[in-house]
Image (cartoon, rainbow, N blue to C red):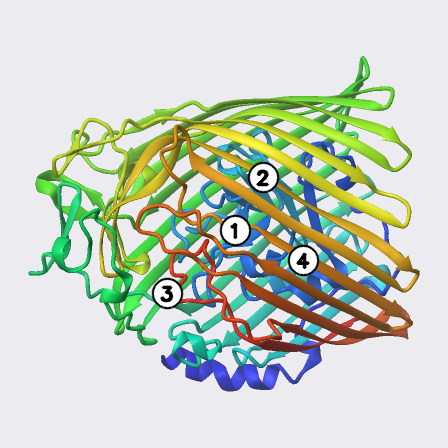
């Protein structure tokens, strides 16, 4: 890994220079109301009918990890599906990609993370000023890809105001013990008159992370990662809004735990796997077809198997107030991305994923009309995607490019009736996927027209108390992987078969391409003032034609997966109760639980996170702050075929920080965050590679932040 060696010395030096890192650019100030930019009318988190979590300021700075999933882990209702140290995706109320949409300031991140858990999300957590998480169906705002929730990444790459004094900047450096992290990140904004320019960058490098001895090795092989992100942007800023553009370049490499190409000889016979000369129906399975886990050694792969990721993205953003008579706001987001990642084994490219994508979003907010406020919007996205195995003539597997087009219209209206706010929304989409091949008989084009509608009511019961009820019928069209996959995906050790219509796969009838339709009810009870505050949520979602990868057969760690549609339900609760014991000390209790299963007693859904219950204590006195967090993740024994149970574990985290004001808007902070301080051996049931990639062992990150 020559690139790793060259970077290591450079990063070790950068980590010692605080001016090369990144942090908030505002001096410490009193808490202020945070508006949720991904909400239709940009209400505060306490005013939305859909449950929302926001991470900003010091809390985000201290929780930031190398991946988005790890950064959000521990928030009520949010887990993650880790794949070593380089990739992890958020799991919201039991659902993840392709039902949880990750957005970059309301536009799609345009990578390949929605296809597989081993594909990294290109957003760099160290460069974020905030994260908004919409739990529950958000399809009416962002499409069927958000039928389970949405995560909006807020950045600073396009300035929205000219800095006071013409100059502002920030810096952060981090060193970690558990994975030998060396990170440096920094940004500067300059401006004069109506023009502001922004330059920022980040570099992170980690080795394989340490785990408890119960794993059998001191580190997880292939869990290393390194990444670099550079952004330059500028904006013209007037009294009523701004127009800006930016360029972002991402370079990343990371290992793949459990990744193996030793199964290249595996092929299918009907619904069975045949690998080499082995008759695994006798060697590796019992009469029911279940895997005997103890019959095979689980060898860990070396660091010669890794992902090399490259992404270049251009953004144009604009927000203006009072653009036309009768309208109070117009919002435009446009992005173009050229994305590529190679899965490399022993210095040779085994698989290449490409995504050339364009996304346009236009929102127009009208002024009150007969008491109603609302947003009308248009969204269009098109991309050329390649990388998945697909079938062509004579069952030859190839990496066929696909043209994907999606256009949508949406409308959201809101009106207050005394203490009750009523909201209603609808969204119509048109999705077309066309293989770039003349062999249409083998891979026919598909067309889907999802339609979603919702209604909600927010009742302000009394001062500080509110009760929100939302009902939604949301539809999602299957993605290209679910439709056309036909062949091995060695990163996840799977042989995947999609839902293409009009064809039979090795004697197995193909599944009809169907729309996924979710009917959901969400109830949220909040108390937002006084010494005791809380947010409690309960939900139930019935999904018709829920598309998932059903494991049909397994040989050692290699599985045969067929994407099928079956009815399923998700039922759960999550929430947090906080009490301010005294001005300097607060205590919170939080937890979540989701029950996900197929209907008609057909079993459980795979990789569903278990229940969790925990507590937090935070304290502040003068420049010192401290936060202690403990939670218990319970055993997951509600499993499906070819899954194994995951034992429960305890997690103890502690953060200490000292922030000092330096005058003239400048400040500095030293902090340390310890995670898994008891060094618990923890298997993440939501992960595709839980046995090959347990959660990190004891780790302490030391950081230095400054703003100027």
The secondary structure type at the circle numbered 3 is strand
State the mark number for residue 155: none
**First of labels 4, 3 by sequence position:** 3
State how far apart marks 2 and 4 are (Cα): 17 Å
Question: Where is mark 3, residue-wise?
Answer: 307
- The residue mark sitting in front, 4 or 3, is 4
Q: Quadrant of residue 26?
A: bottom right
Q: Secondary structure at mark 2?
A: strand
Q: Is residue 199 visible?
A: no
Instruction: Give the foreground label among 3 and 2.
Output: 2
Up-down relation of residue 672 to residue 16 (above or below) = above
Q: CA distance from mark 3 to mark 1?
A: 30 Å
- Mark positioned earlier in the residue sequence (3 or 1): 3
Read off the residue under disc 4.
Answer: 614
Q: Would you call the spot at circle 2 few (<14 residues within 10 Å), some (14-19), or many (20 or more)?
A: some
The crowding category of the residue bearing disc 3, from other C-alpha atoms within 10 Å (few below 14, some 14 to 19, many at least 20), is many
Residue 467 drawn above or below residue 486: above
Outermost residue, top direction? 370
Instruction: Count neighbours of disc 1 (C-alpha within 10 A) and say few if under 14, some if 14 to 19, many if 20 or more.
Output: many
Location of mark 1 (residue): 610
Rate crowding at label 4 as few (under 14), some (14 to 19) or many (20 or more) other CA atoms within 10 Å.
many
Q: Where's the N terminus, which quadrant?
A: bottom left
15 is higher (above) or lower (below) than 97: below
Q: Which quadrant does the C terminus fall into?
A: bottom right
User: How far is mark 3 from mark 2, CA to CA?
Assistant: 36 Å
| Front residue of 50 and 583 | 583
Question: At 69% across and 67% down in the image, what residue appears?
Answer: 62
Residue receiving disc 2: 572
Q: Position of residue 92 (x, y in %)?
A: 56, 45
Is residue 52 shown left or right of residue 593?
right
In primary-sequence order, the first of circles 2 and 4 is 2
């Amino acid at each position: 890994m020559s690139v790793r060696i060259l970077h290591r010395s450079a990063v070790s030096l950068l980590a010692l220079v605080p001016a090369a890192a990144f942090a908030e650019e505002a001096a410490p100030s009193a808490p202020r109301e945070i508006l949720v930019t991904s909400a239709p009318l940009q209400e505060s988190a306490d005013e939305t009918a859909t449950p929302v979590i926001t991470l900003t300021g010091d809390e985000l700075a201290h929780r930031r990890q190398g991946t988005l999933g790890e950064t959000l882990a521990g928030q009520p209702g949010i887990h993650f599906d880790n794949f070593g140290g380089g990739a992890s995706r958020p799991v919201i109320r039991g659902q993840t990609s392709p039902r949880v949409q990750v957005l970059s300031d309301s536009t799609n991140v345009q990578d390949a993370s929605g296809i597989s858990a081993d594909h990294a999300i290109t957003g760099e957590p160290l460069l974020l000023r905030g994260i908004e998480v919409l739990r529950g169906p958000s399809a009416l705002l962002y499409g069927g890809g958000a039928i389970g929730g949405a995560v909006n990444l807020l950045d600073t790459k396009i300035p929205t105001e000219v800095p006071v004094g013409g100059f502002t900047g920030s810096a952060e450096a981090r060193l970690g013990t558990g994975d030998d992290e060396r990170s440096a990140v920094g940004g500067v904004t300059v401006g004069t008159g109506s023009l502001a320019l922004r330059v920022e960058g980040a570099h992170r490098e980690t080795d394989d992370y340490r785990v408890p001895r119960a794993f059998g090795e001191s580190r997880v092989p292939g869990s290393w990662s390194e990444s670099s992100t550079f952004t330059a942007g500028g904006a013209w800023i007037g009294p009523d809004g701004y127009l800006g553009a930016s360029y972002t370049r991402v370079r990343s490499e990371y290992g793949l735990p459990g990744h193996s190409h030793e199964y290249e000889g595996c092929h299918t016979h009907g619904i069975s796997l045949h690998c080499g000369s082995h008759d695994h129906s006798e060697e590796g399975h019992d009469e029911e077809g279940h895997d005997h886990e103890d019959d095979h050694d689980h060898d860990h792969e070396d660091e010669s198997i890794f992902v090399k990721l490259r992404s270049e993205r251009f953004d144009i953003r604009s927000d203006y107030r009072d653009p036309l008579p009768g309208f109070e706001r117009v919002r435009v987001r446009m992005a173009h991305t050229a994305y590529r990642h190679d899965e490399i084994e022993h210095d040779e490219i085994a698989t290449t994923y490409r995504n050339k994508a364009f996304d346009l979003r236009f929102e127009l907010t009208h002024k009150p009309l007969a008491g109603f406020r609302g947003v009308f919007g248009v969204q269009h996205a098109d991309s050329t995607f390649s990388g998945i195995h697909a079938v062509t003539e004579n069952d030859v597997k190839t990496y066929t490019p696909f043209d994907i087009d999606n256009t949508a219209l949406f409308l959201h209206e809101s009106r207050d009736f005394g203490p009750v706010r009523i909201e209603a929304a609808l969204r119509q989409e048109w999705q077309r996927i066309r293989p770039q091949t003349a062999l249409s008989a083998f891979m026919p084009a598909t067309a889907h027209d999802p339609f979603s509608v919702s209604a909600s009511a927010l009742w302000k019961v009394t001062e500080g108390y509110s009760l929100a009820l939302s009902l939604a019928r949301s539809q999602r069209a299957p993605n290209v992987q679910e439709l056309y996959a036909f062949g091995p995906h060695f990163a996840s050790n799977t042989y995947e078969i999609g839902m293409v219509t009009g064809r039979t796969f090795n004697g197995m009838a193909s599944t009809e391409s169907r729309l996924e339709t979710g009917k959901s009810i969400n109830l949220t009870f909040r108390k937002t003032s006084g010494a005791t505050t809380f947010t409690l949520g309960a939900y139930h979602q019935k999904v018709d034609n829920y598309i998932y990868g059903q494991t049909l057969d397994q040989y050692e760690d290699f599985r045969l997966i067929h994407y099928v549609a079956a009815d399923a339900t998700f039922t759960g609760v999550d929430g947090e109760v906080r009490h301010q014991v005294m001005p300097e000390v607060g205590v919170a209790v939080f937890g979540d639980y989701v029950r996900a299963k197929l209907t008609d007693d057909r079993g459980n859904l795979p990789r569903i996170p278990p229940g969790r219950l925990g507590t937090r204590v935070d304290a502040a006195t003068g420049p010192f702050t401290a936060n202690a967090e403990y939670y218990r993740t319970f055993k997951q024994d509600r499993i499906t075929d070819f899954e194994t149970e995951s034992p429960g574990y305890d997690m103890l985290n502690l953060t200490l920080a000292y922030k000092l004001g330096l005058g003239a808007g400048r400040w500095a902070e030293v902090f340390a965050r310890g995670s898994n301080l008891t060094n618990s051996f923890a298997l993440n049931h939501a992960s595709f590679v839980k046995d090959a990639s347990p959660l990190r062992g004891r780790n302490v990150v030391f950081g230095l932040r400054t703003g100027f």
